């Protein structure tokens, strides 16, 4: 019987905003590229384009091994996106759970428009 690879979950911190709000010119291209990479690599992509509530955000981050933030000015203006990054990096959650703070993902990547910043 062949060994099945362990499932990998990627949390994609992105912003979908109202059409009248300006996002970066590269936002849709970057989102599509990340989804394509996930598909090709058999990685489950947990998208966060719309606010789903803090308990669900925390749960999705907890089950993810990878956190990727596609940052532009719209992302920077969102308090919930800042929370996602802070929580994934080991910051305090909003849902009472007890325990200690620790980095919750194995790898974090933040992409700002066309510039890449790695945190490992």
Image (cartoon, grey):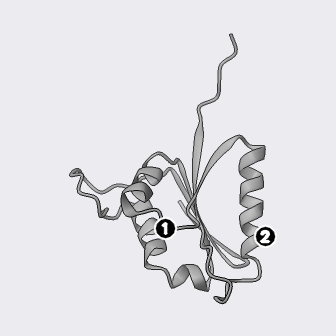
Determine the residue located farthest toward the top in the rendered image: 1
Residue 103 in sight in this render = no
Residue 111 in the image: x percent, y percent?
64, 71
Left or right of residue 91: residue 112: right
Label 1 secondary element: loop
The 10 Å Cα crowd at callout 2, few under 14, some 14 to 19, many 20 or more, is: few
In the rendered structure, are the residues bearing label 2 and label 1 in contact, judged by CB atoms less than 8 Å apart? no
Image side of residue 25 versus residue 103, left or right: right
Looking at the rendered image, the disc whose residue lies closer to the viewer, 2 or 1, is 1
The x, y position of residue 40, in whole percent, is: 78, 45
Quadrant housing the N terminus? top right
**In terms of depth relative to the viewer, which is nearer, 19 or 77?**
19
| Residue at the image position 59 percent from the left and 35 percent from the top | 7
**Image coords of residue 92 (percent x, y):** 30, 64
Residue 93 coordinates in the image, percent (x, y): 31, 62
Residue placed farthest to the left in the image?
A: 98
Q: Residue at x 72, y 59 (%)?
A: 34
Provide the residue designation for mark 2: 29
| Residue 8 location, quadrant | top right
Give the residue at mark 1.
51
- In depth, the one of 8 and 100 nearer the eye is 8
Q: Distance between the Cα atoms at labels 2 and 1? A: 21 Å
Q: Secondary structure at mark 2?
A: helix
The residue lying at 69 percent from left, 79 percent from top is 113
Query: Looking at the image, is 110 positioned above or below residue 67?
Result: below
Residue shown at 51% from the left, 85% from the top: 77
Query: Does residue 24 appear anywhere in the picture?
Result: yes
The image quarter in which residue 20 lies: bottom right
Against 118, is 76 above or below?
Answer: below
């Amino acid at each position: 019987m062949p060994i099945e690879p362990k499932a990998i979950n990627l949390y994609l911190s992105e912003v979908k905003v109202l059409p009248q709000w300006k996002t970066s010119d590269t936002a849709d291209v970057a989102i599509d590229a990340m989804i394509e990479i996930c598909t090709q690599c058999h990685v489950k992509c947990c998208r966060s384009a719309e606010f789903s509530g803090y308990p669900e955000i925390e749960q999705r981050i907890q089950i993810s091994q990878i956190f990727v933030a596609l940052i532009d000015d719209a992302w920077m203006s969102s308090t919930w996106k800042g929370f996602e990054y802070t929580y994934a990096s080991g910051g305090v959650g909003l849902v009472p759970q007890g325990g200690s703070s620790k980095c919750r993902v194995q790898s974090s990547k933040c992409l700002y428009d066309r510039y890449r910043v790695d945190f490992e």
